[in-house]
Image: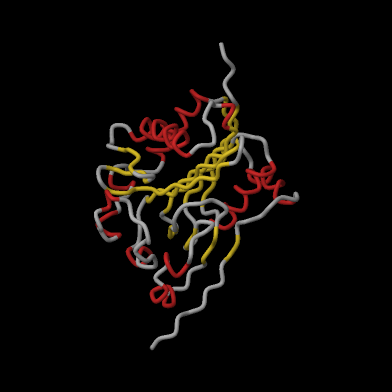
Amino acid sequence: MLQRPSLTYLHTTMMPIFAQLQLEEALLRVSKENICLINRGSPPAIVLGISGKPEEWINLSAWSQNPVPVLRRYSGGGTVVVDENTLFVTFIMNGTEIAVPSQIQAVHAYFETLWQKAFYPHPFRLIENDYVLGSRKVGGNAQYLARDRWVHHTSFLWDFKPEHMGLLARPPKMPSYRQERGHLDFLTTLSSCFTSADELLSPLVNELSVRFSLSEGNVEELSKCLTQEYRRQTMQESLAVPLVT
Protein backbone atom coordinates (compact mmCIF):
# COMPACT_ATOMS: atom_id res chain seq x y z
CA MET A 1 0.00 0.00 0.00
CA LEU A 2 1.31 3.45 -0.92
CA GLN A 3 1.93 5.73 2.03
CA ARG A 4 -0.38 8.73 2.11
CA PRO A 5 1.29 12.13 2.20
CA SER A 6 0.98 14.00 5.48
CA LEU A 7 -1.21 17.09 5.87
CA THR A 8 -1.32 19.45 8.84
CA TYR A 9 -4.84 20.71 9.47
CA LEU A 10 -5.37 24.00 11.30
CA HIS A 11 -8.79 25.40 12.21
CA THR A 12 -9.13 28.95 13.58
CA THR A 13 -11.91 31.48 14.16
CA MET A 14 -11.81 35.23 13.47
CA MET A 15 -8.12 35.40 12.70
CA PRO A 16 -7.70 38.79 10.99
CA ILE A 17 -7.12 38.24 7.30
CA PHE A 18 -3.88 40.24 7.43
CA ALA A 19 -2.49 37.87 10.09
CA GLN A 20 -3.76 34.88 8.13
CA LEU A 21 -2.07 35.99 4.91
CA GLN A 22 1.18 36.71 6.76
CA LEU A 23 1.09 33.22 8.26
CA GLU A 24 0.30 31.65 4.89
CA GLU A 25 3.19 33.42 3.21
CA ALA A 26 5.61 32.38 5.93
CA LEU A 27 4.47 28.75 5.72
CA LEU A 28 4.79 28.86 1.93
CA ARG A 29 8.34 30.18 1.96
CA VAL A 30 9.78 28.62 5.13
CA SER A 31 7.92 25.41 5.92
CA LYS A 32 8.06 22.16 3.95
CA GLU A 33 4.77 20.81 5.32
CA ASN A 34 1.53 20.29 3.45
CA ILE A 35 -0.97 22.49 5.27
CA CYS A 36 -4.72 23.11 5.23
CA LEU A 37 -5.73 26.27 7.07
CA ILE A 38 -9.40 26.98 7.73
CA ASN A 39 -10.42 30.29 9.28
CA ARG A 40 -14.00 31.24 10.07
CA GLY A 41 -14.39 34.99 9.72
CA SER A 42 -12.24 38.09 9.94
CA PRO A 43 -12.72 41.75 10.80
CA PRO A 44 -13.78 43.57 7.61
CA ALA A 45 -11.08 44.27 5.03
CA ILE A 46 -10.50 44.58 1.29
CA VAL A 47 -7.82 42.28 -0.13
CA LEU A 48 -6.13 43.11 -3.43
CA GLY A 49 -4.21 40.64 -5.56
CA ILE A 50 -0.49 41.33 -5.74
CA SER A 51 -0.78 43.43 -8.91
CA GLY A 52 -4.25 44.88 -8.33
CA LYS A 53 -4.73 48.64 -8.71
CA PRO A 54 -6.99 50.12 -6.01
CA GLU A 55 -8.58 52.63 -8.39
CA GLU A 56 -9.69 49.76 -10.66
CA TRP A 57 -11.03 47.39 -8.01
CA ILE A 58 -12.30 49.59 -5.17
CA ASN A 59 -15.26 51.97 -5.13
CA LEU A 60 -13.23 54.74 -3.57
CA SER A 61 -16.25 56.95 -2.97
CA ALA A 62 -18.00 54.22 -0.95
CA TRP A 63 -14.73 53.31 0.77
CA SER A 64 -14.26 56.93 1.90
CA GLN A 65 -17.54 56.55 3.84
CA ASN A 66 -16.46 53.19 5.30
CA PRO A 67 -12.65 53.04 5.16
CA VAL A 68 -11.97 49.43 6.09
CA PRO A 69 -8.33 48.28 5.93
CA VAL A 70 -6.99 47.58 2.45
CA LEU A 71 -4.43 44.79 2.11
CA ARG A 72 -2.30 43.41 -0.69
CA ARG A 73 -1.75 39.68 -0.62
CA TYR A 74 1.23 37.73 -1.95
CA SER A 75 -0.82 35.83 -4.57
CA GLY A 76 -2.40 36.84 -7.86
CA GLY A 77 -6.04 37.14 -8.77
CA GLY A 78 -8.71 39.74 -8.17
CA THR A 79 -9.98 41.71 -5.19
CA VAL A 80 -12.32 40.54 -2.43
CA VAL A 81 -14.01 42.14 0.54
CA VAL A 82 -14.09 39.91 3.63
CA ASP A 83 -15.74 40.04 7.04
CA GLU A 84 -17.04 37.85 9.83
CA ASN A 85 -19.24 35.97 7.31
CA THR A 86 -16.33 34.79 5.16
CA LEU A 87 -15.07 31.22 5.35
CA PHE A 88 -11.41 30.97 4.35
CA VAL A 89 -9.83 27.70 3.23
CA THR A 90 -6.16 27.64 2.22
CA PHE A 91 -4.01 24.77 0.99
CA ILE A 92 -0.21 25.14 0.98
CA MET A 93 1.15 22.07 -0.77
CA ASN A 94 4.19 20.31 -2.15
CA GLY A 95 2.80 19.53 -5.56
CA THR A 96 5.14 16.62 -6.26
CA GLU A 97 3.80 14.72 -3.23
CA ILE A 98 0.26 14.66 -4.64
CA ALA A 99 1.13 14.67 -8.35
CA VAL A 100 -0.37 18.13 -8.90
CA PRO A 101 2.14 20.33 -10.72
CA SER A 102 2.40 24.08 -10.24
CA GLN A 103 0.01 24.80 -13.10
CA ILE A 104 -3.25 26.64 -12.58
CA GLN A 105 -5.31 24.16 -14.64
CA ALA A 106 -3.97 21.20 -12.65
CA VAL A 107 -4.55 22.90 -9.30
CA HIS A 108 -8.08 23.92 -10.27
CA ALA A 109 -8.94 20.42 -11.50
CA TYR A 110 -7.73 18.88 -8.23
CA PHE A 111 -9.78 21.21 -6.04
CA GLU A 112 -12.89 21.13 -8.16
CA THR A 113 -13.17 17.38 -7.56
CA LEU A 114 -12.28 17.77 -3.88
CA TRP A 115 -14.92 20.43 -3.27
CA GLN A 116 -17.55 18.61 -5.31
CA LYS A 117 -17.32 15.76 -2.81
CA ALA A 118 -17.74 18.18 0.10
CA PHE A 119 -20.66 20.05 -1.52
CA TYR A 120 -22.56 16.95 -2.71
CA PRO A 121 -25.46 16.89 -3.59
CA HIS A 122 -25.44 20.66 -4.25
CA PRO A 123 -24.57 21.83 -7.81
CA PHE A 124 -21.02 23.00 -7.14
CA ARG A 125 -18.55 23.54 -9.99
CA LEU A 126 -15.66 25.66 -11.18
CA ILE A 127 -16.49 28.17 -13.92
CA GLU A 128 -13.83 30.50 -15.31
CA ASN A 129 -11.78 30.36 -12.07
CA ASP A 130 -14.82 30.98 -9.81
CA TYR A 131 -16.45 28.53 -7.42
CA VAL A 132 -20.13 28.49 -8.34
CA LEU A 133 -23.41 27.10 -7.04
CA GLY A 134 -25.81 26.87 -9.96
CA SER A 135 -25.06 30.05 -11.89
CA ARG A 136 -23.94 32.21 -8.96
CA LYS A 137 -20.53 32.70 -7.44
CA VAL A 138 -20.10 31.39 -3.90
CA GLY A 139 -16.32 31.66 -3.58
CA GLY A 140 -13.28 33.24 -5.14
CA ASN A 141 -9.90 31.62 -5.26
CA ALA A 142 -6.33 32.64 -5.98
CA GLN A 143 -3.03 30.85 -6.45
CA TYR A 144 0.65 31.26 -5.79
CA LEU A 145 2.59 28.86 -7.98
CA ALA A 146 6.28 28.20 -7.32
CA ARG A 147 8.41 25.45 -8.82
CA ASP A 148 7.58 22.64 -6.39
CA ARG A 149 5.27 24.34 -3.90
CA TRP A 150 2.00 26.16 -4.39
CA VAL A 151 -0.90 27.82 -2.58
CA HIS A 152 -4.59 27.62 -3.41
CA HIS A 153 -6.70 29.82 -1.15
CA THR A 154 -10.42 30.41 -1.24
CA SER A 155 -12.81 32.87 0.37
CA PHE A 156 -16.31 31.41 0.55
CA LEU A 157 -19.36 33.53 1.31
CA TRP A 158 -21.25 32.06 4.23
CA ASP A 159 -23.25 35.26 3.97
CA PHE A 160 -22.48 38.83 2.90
CA LYS A 161 -23.48 42.39 3.64
CA PRO A 162 -24.57 44.46 0.63
CA GLU A 163 -22.81 47.51 2.05
CA HIS A 164 -19.53 45.63 2.09
CA MET A 165 -19.97 44.43 -1.47
CA GLY A 166 -20.63 48.05 -2.38
CA LEU A 167 -17.00 48.79 -1.50
CA LEU A 168 -15.93 46.95 -4.65
CA ALA A 169 -16.00 48.52 -8.11
CA ARG A 170 -17.16 46.54 -11.11
CA PRO A 171 -14.00 44.62 -11.94
CA PRO A 172 -11.96 45.58 -15.00
CA LYS A 173 -12.32 42.04 -16.32
CA MET A 174 -15.44 39.95 -15.72
CA PRO A 175 -16.07 36.28 -16.51
CA SER A 176 -18.48 35.77 -19.37
CA TYR A 177 -20.90 33.71 -17.25
CA ARG A 178 -21.43 36.78 -15.04
CA GLN A 179 -23.34 38.37 -17.94
CA GLU A 180 -22.78 41.89 -16.59
CA ARG A 181 -24.72 41.12 -13.41
CA GLY A 182 -24.15 43.35 -10.40
CA HIS A 183 -22.76 41.89 -7.18
CA LEU A 184 -26.13 41.21 -5.57
CA ASP A 185 -27.45 39.29 -8.62
CA PHE A 186 -24.17 37.49 -9.25
CA LEU A 187 -23.39 36.15 -5.76
CA THR A 188 -24.90 33.47 -3.56
CA THR A 189 -24.05 32.13 -0.12
CA LEU A 190 -23.18 28.88 1.63
CA SER A 191 -26.01 29.57 4.05
CA SER A 192 -28.44 29.13 1.14
CA CYS A 193 -27.80 25.38 1.18
CA PHE A 194 -26.07 24.53 4.51
CA THR A 195 -27.40 25.00 8.02
CA SER A 196 -23.88 25.43 9.44
CA ALA A 197 -20.31 25.63 8.18
CA ASP A 198 -19.65 22.25 9.82
CA GLU A 199 -22.08 20.69 7.36
CA LEU A 200 -19.60 21.59 4.61
CA LEU A 201 -16.35 21.21 6.53
CA SER A 202 -17.09 17.77 7.97
CA PRO A 203 -17.23 15.99 4.57
CA LEU A 204 -14.21 18.03 3.47
CA VAL A 205 -12.14 16.75 6.40
CA ASN A 206 -13.44 13.22 5.79
CA GLU A 207 -12.24 13.39 2.19
CA LEU A 208 -8.89 14.81 3.26
CA SER A 209 -8.48 11.93 5.72
CA VAL A 210 -8.84 9.54 2.79
CA ARG A 211 -6.21 11.33 0.71
CA PHE A 212 -3.78 12.27 3.48
CA SER A 213 -2.43 11.31 6.85
CA LEU A 214 -3.93 14.17 8.88
CA SER A 215 -2.50 15.76 11.99
CA GLU A 216 -3.89 18.73 13.88
CA GLY A 217 -1.77 21.87 13.78
CA ASN A 218 -1.16 24.48 16.45
CA VAL A 219 -1.20 28.20 15.66
CA GLU A 220 1.57 29.04 18.09
CA GLU A 221 3.85 26.33 16.73
CA LEU A 222 3.21 27.13 13.07
CA SER A 223 3.64 30.86 13.73
CA LYS A 224 7.29 30.36 14.69
CA CYS A 225 8.11 30.52 10.98
CA LEU A 226 7.14 34.22 11.04
CA THR A 227 10.38 35.02 12.87
CA GLN A 228 12.57 33.64 10.08
CA GLU A 229 14.01 35.52 7.12
CA TYR A 230 12.00 35.23 3.90
CA ARG A 231 10.60 37.41 1.13
CA ARG A 232 7.49 39.24 2.39
CA GLN A 233 4.90 40.54 -0.06
CA THR A 234 1.79 40.72 2.14
CA MET A 235 1.29 44.35 3.14
CA GLN A 236 -1.20 47.01 4.14
CA GLU A 237 -2.08 49.67 1.59
CA SER A 238 -2.44 53.38 2.27
CA LEU A 239 -5.26 54.91 0.26
CA ALA A 240 -6.11 58.57 -0.05
CA VAL A 241 -9.73 59.51 0.53
CA PRO A 242 -10.99 60.96 -2.79
CA LEU A 243 -11.89 64.62 -2.83
CA VAL A 244 -15.61 65.40 -3.08
CA THR A 245 -16.25 67.86 -5.92
119 left or right of 213 in image = left
Q: In this orientation, does residue 16 appear?
A: no
Residue projecting furthest to the bottom? 245
Badge count: 0
Residue 11 is situated, as x and y percent measured from the top left of the image, at 54, 42
Residue 120 is situated, as x and y percent measured from the top left of the image, at 32, 32
- Name above or below for residue 189 compared with residue 238: above
The quarter of the picture where the N terminus appears is top right
- Name above or below for residue 29 compared with residue 3: below
The quarter of the picture where the C terminus appears is bottom left
Residue projecting furthest to the top? 1
Residue 90 is situated, as x and y percent measured from the top left of the image, at 51, 43
Seen from the viewer's position, the closer of residues 181 and 187 is 181
Seen from the viewer's position, the closer of residues 234 and 223 is 234
100 left or right of 29 in image = left
Residue 153 is situated, as x and y percent measured from the top left of the image, at 49, 45
Seen from the viewer's position, the closer of residues 134 and 231 is 231
- Name above or below for residue 5 compared with residue 125: above
